Image (tube, rainbow, N blue to C red):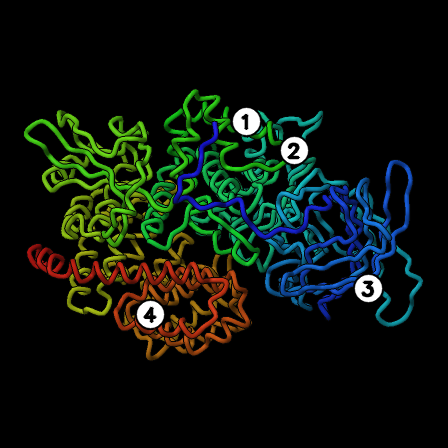
Amino acid sequence: MSTKLHPTFPDTSIHEALPSNVTPLHYEVHLLDLNVKKNTFSGLVNIQFAVNSATDCITLHQKFLNFQSANAVSSVTKTETDVPVSAITKHDDRETVEFKLNTGAPISKGHIGLKIHYTGQIRTDMAGFYTSHYEPVNGGDTEYILVTQFESAEARSAFPCYDEPNRKATFDIGLTVDKEVTALSNMPVLSSKTLDSGKKGPGFDKTLKHVQFETTPKMSTYLIAWAVGKFEHVEAHTLKPYRGKTLPIRVYTIPGQSKNGQFALSVAQNDVDFLSKIFDVEYPLPKLDLLAIPQFGANAMENWGMVTFRATALLFDPESSDATYQQNVAYVVSHEIAHSWFGNYVTMNWWSDLWLNESFATFVGSLCVEEMHPEWETFTDFVTNGVEVALDLDGLRNSHPIEVRVNTASEIDQIFDPISYLKGGSIIRMVASTVGVDVFLKGVSKYLKKYAFGNAKSDDLWDAVSTVSGQDITTSVAPWIRAVGYPYISFEKVGDSQLLISQKRFFSSGDAKPEEDQIVWWIPNVPALADGKTKSATVSSNGFLKLNKNTEGFYRVIYEESLFDNIVANLNKFSAEDKIGLIADTAAGAQAGLMKTSQLLHLLDSLKDEKDVNVWIEMIKRLGILKQLYFSDTKILSKLVAFSRNLFKARFHQIFAEPVEKLSLPQLKLRSMLFAETGAAGLAETITNATNLIQRQSIEPSLKLGVFKTLLGNKETCDQETLNAILKEAKHPSSIDSTEIALKALGSIGNPDKYLKDILSLYFSDYVLEMDYTFLTMSLVENPVTKVKFWNFFKKNYSRFREEVAMWTLDRLIKNFLPRLVSKELYDDIDSFFSKQDTTGYTKGLRQSLDSIKNSLAWEKLAKKDVSEWLEANGY
């Protein structure tokens, strides 16, 4: 049940690829001479190819590699012939290498084996084969971990290969390492043998071992992984047997931290059994390792059988960790294990279908956490931190489709964003809600079994769901996957008993042109618009309250004022998911000029007794955006701060009065957020509490962030002693999450003239790693008195950011902090500054950021009088 592309949909089938004259079948990869002082290594790879067409040259990907020699063997049936390699030619600009075969006549059938000796760099930018380090708890020399991060196209920097997801092969990995370290890879250890090199004297006094791992199943190069270091671990087994025995699951850490892996271990144990059951496909590998890495850029990477994480996404200490990190660990672990099926077992054919990996892991990861901890309200959390985040980004003209054309490797990293993860996950949630989650999972199972150990495209999945559900999901969902954006549904009264319901293209700027509003979207939870052919219809108004139940549909809803007022009068009848959607739709509608911003303020005021933490998250987020709009208008900003103080204080007093041991995880999250927000708004009781807690040195973990932000944000309590205490937490963390928490707080300072220099000195220092720059940056640009100063610092140090920071880090920094710089002067300065730079690697994020600022400026101007009058009329 495939569907033809709409003329405006991108053609994602065209991309840069290596020649198809041969197909890789099997790799033997052996790494040796690993030198952490010089950051070099040697390698030997033996690749077996099937010959597809006449061949006298084999082209492979490579990056930062140097080649010493190569030789080939041609085999037809049982006859083998040595084939000299007459030339090895590198093309570093294309990241390729060509091996010219001296064959006399091209080889047109059979197999070719190519053995290559090469050397490479152990990198320091958290990509490819790289080095990570840590200081031992009990002192001593710095210890090093060697580890890999190959997604999306970095396997080529560790061994020459066909570094494309649809060129799957099997792999034998072998590592020659110091005898005293542990070596890990995708598969279990097959053998470990101590080597006698025969070399004596200085520099040759370390005993080596060769560790050989079992052969992998067919898999993509970006999922290959290994790690070498001094590790300890905790272990469990699956509760259910697989292929006759239970499977080992281990959490590996640096020495002294393994006890903090127990919670993640229990999550992983549950996930493997739960996902094997709901997919009706057993976990495919014989083991699962989870490894915490001191320097790791993302949250985690789903390397098959050896998943790598940053420490805060894997480790949790019940005694010292902020409770909110427990939910994060559960989700990230579940997301990565879900990739064992989505992405690893069945892999997207090309990066244009990245969403097949990430969207499904996003949805299924949430499904896992919901199954383990229903009291955490995971899918309610997903509405505010998933659906609404994606809707905000996808309302920009410079958004991109879920299924997006990607031509070269350099473009891939820019699409690891909320569209690929969260919009895709939202569409999956919408489809699953429509056909039923059980039916949807049966379709998923059918898809997994059909494409096992292979590659697939978007329609392959939707065809499977269509077959099982009996509905043509493939056709219905096509615009949601292949077009940019989404609609808004508008409601207007027609007479006394009818409503006119219409769908129109939504832009945050509110200026969709007729040619941009041609798609008729499938709106499955609105019967009048569910055929995918109807743009408007008249429906009965009898009993009508609100559309988009539980915010299951990926669209905005805009109500005329009388309908909106009726909804606000009946807020107690709606679910938390309904309220989150209503808040976000009202804010988005106000920005687009479809509603008044005063309606948003009225709605927030009406929700001040709300109990649900996720509704509060959305309230705080939208009120924070309003403050960003007016950060340079001290009069309106002070009134918005006063409104915030009044909005938060009653609920904060209620929850702060309750015994902490009786609070659930969502309640602890709410308590922590409201502490931080009331402190930022200058509530006297919060400031007093924060002062007492830091003086008594008795800050419970879940209040650390709130206490730090409160004390730094108020000029009277932001002194050198307080700053030094929080800087110490950033530089010498007392718990797993201390550095992140301190950095999230440090940008809150209320007197930057005194202390900002100390904080900015953390960039490019030995204390703060680039993987944590985002935490500090976001706290600085969300603070009205430091955002311009940070922008000036960034401009002044741009060359260092460009040269010393990994491109994916820079891309994420830019797309996250620029939208907070809302003023005409800043917009012009940003536009002018970047017009003189090479923006390769972050062009998409820059365009989206400029879009966002422009839309915010229009909103600020449009709403200024309305906001001022509402605040004044309500006593602020």
Q: Secondary structure at mark 1?
A: helix
* Residue labelled with disc 1: 445
Q: Mark 4 falls on what kind of element?
A: helix
How far, Cα to Cα, is label 1 from label 4?
49 Å
| Secondary structure found at label 3 | strand
User: Which one is closest to the eye, mark 1 or mark 3?
Assistant: 3
Q: Which residue is mark 3?
A: 68
Amino acid type, residue under disc 3 in the picture: Gln
Give the residue type that dot 4 points to.
Answer: Lys
* Whole-number angstrom distance, CA of label 4 to CA of label 2: 49 Å
Query: Horizontally, is 788 left or right of 268 in the view?
Result: left
Which amino acid does the dot numbered 1 rest on?
A: Ser
The residue closer to the viewer here, 159 or 843, is 843
Is residue 251 among what the camera can see?
no
In which quadrant of the rendered view does residue 31 lie? Answer: bottom right
* Residue occupying the point 65% across, 64% down: 123
Q: Which residue is mark 4?
A: 787
Q: Nearer the viewer, residue 420 or 289?
A: 420
Q: Which residue is mark 2?
A: 284
Q: Given the image, on which type of amino acid does mark 2 rest? A: Pro
Are there few (<14), some (14-19), or many (20+) residues within 10 Å of tag 3? few
Position of residue 119 in the picture relative to residue 868 (left or right):
right
Q: Earlier in the sequence, mark 2 or mark 3?
A: 3
Inter-mark Cα distance, 2 to 3? 37 Å
In the shown orientation, is residue 213 left or right of residue 656?
A: right
Q: N-terminal of the two: label 1 or label 4?
A: 1
Q: Tag on residue 846?
A: none
Q: Is residue 184 above or below residue 831?
A: above
Residue 424 x, y percent position in the rendering: 43, 41
Is residue 724 visible to us here?
Answer: yes
Which of discs 2 and 3 lies nearer the camera? The answer is 3
